[in-house]
Amino acid sequence: MKYFLKCIDCGAEYPKTEIIYTCPKCDGLLDVIYDYDEIKASIDEKKLREEPPSVWKYKMLLPVDIDPVTINEGGTPLYKCDKLAKLIGVKELYVKHEGMNPTGSFKDRGMTVGVSKAIELGMETVACASTGNTSASLAIYGAKAGIPAIVLLPAGKVALGKVGQALMHGGKVIMIKGNFDDALVLVRKLCSEERIYLLNSINPYRLEGQKTIAFEIVDQLGFKVPDRVVLPVGNAGNITAINKGFKEFQKLGITDRRPKMTGIQTAGACPIVNAIKSGAEDITPEMNPETIATAIRIGNPVNAKKALSAIRESGGCAESVTDEELIEAQKALARLEGIGVEPASATSVAGLKKLVEAGVISKDEVVVCVTTGHLLKDPEEIIEICEEPVTVEPTIEALKSAIFE
Ligand code: F0G
């Protein structure tokens, strides 16, 4: 398959065999560029419409030339949420629940591609910095591929389920006395000095896997495009990836328009929102990001430039929500629709509600919220925000009085 890497800043091009993460000339972010005429000619229209969605259903648009390292990622449900739509006041609302991936987050889409790429390039160790989900996913795909995975986590700021996954699947887990942004600087340095393949979302191949969220949304809506896609933003890779997916389907003539990409952050960690609202060309990093949504506790998102342009060119916007607002949305998803999500994921719904109330999002829109991770990722947060269970003596009287009084 034909593709190459191209710098989004200076336009320099590099062959797919090079092991680089940013442009060697100007340090700009890289994008994967394909020959869309070749891809278009290879698409089997009947198969595209009939085969159920999964990451590798769309392999004609993925930059992997070997048999992939896979544990059946993608194919996550797109739930039509009428009760939530009514509560928020929009015409049609869907939730794409990425928590239903094999390791409980959307990261698996990127890792099946990224770890496959590592193997293809002959790399024998992989690494990442993570707020948790990326590390869980990398540990699992490393295990499946039979290569060591080194993961750097911000000490004391990672949800329990994610640490548990990384440990259980045999990741080399290292706690850094610093935040995620510090850990990312370190792991980038490590991978530039040692023969270790970096699998943070600065790696352009990882984002290619994540763009399949867009393909699946279109597929599951019967090849229709929603008006808007709302999702949490942390390191700002996913919003970039999903926007690219929608652009590619349009380029290939599969769809005829694109949704407005809408990014949500928390009030304690919102450099992208600030840049969008002030019209700034780049972000101002935040030194001390803080939020209950530890997955997106990020002050200096590496993909900021790509994400700002994805939001702007799609006609979207960005908003921040408080921890209280996201907890309310997390409970509404759980109790109205039966969708269990981790705190970061609930920002999508909280942000949608806020933007509808403010009149920024019209009530006539068909909206898809992406919920990025599963509820069970962060059991400690659940205990913190829910009512404590009652404990009673083992008698029918005590039981009835606990239920009815
Ligand atoms: N939601 C969840 C549950 C996440 O884990 C992340 C990122 C995001 C949203 C934001 O996605 O970074 O592409 O903008 N988690 C990364 C990690 C940083 O290390 O697991 P993004």
Image (cartoon, helix red, strand yellow):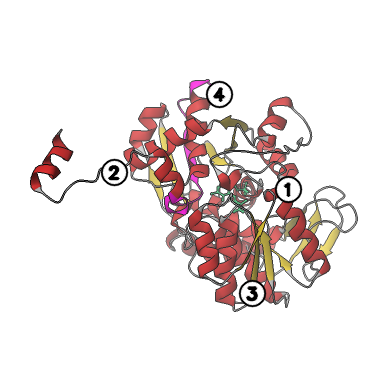
Disc 2 on helix, strand or loop? loop
Quick check: 6 left or right of 52? Answer: right
Query: Is residue 227 in view?
Result: yes
Which residue corresponds to mark 2? 389
Few, some or many C-alpha atoms within 10 Å of disc 4 (few <14, some 14-19, many ≥20)? few
Q: Nearer the viewer, residue 394 or 299?
A: 394
Q: Which residue position holds label 3?
A: 148
* Nearest to N terminus: mark 3 or mark 4: 3
Give the foreground label among 3 and 4: 3
Which segment did they paint magenta? 357-379
Residue 136, relative to residue 305: is it above or below? below
- Asked if the stretch drawn in magenta spans residue 205, the answer is no
Name the spot of residue 141 as percent of width and height, x first: 57, 70
Left or right placement of residue 370 versus residue 288 in this view: left
Mark 1, residue position: 302
The CA distance from mark 1 to mark 3 is: 25 Å
Query: Quadrant of the image for the C terminus?
Result: top left
Residue at the spot x=77%, y=35% of the render?
284
Q: Quadrant of residue 337?
A: top left
The image shows residue 4 at horizontal and vertical percentages of: 77, 63
Q: Are marks 3 and 4 in contact (CB under 8 Å)?
A: no
Q: Which dot marks residue 360? A: 4
- Foreground: disc 2 or disc 3: 2
**Ligand 1 under 8 Å from disc 4 Cβ:** no
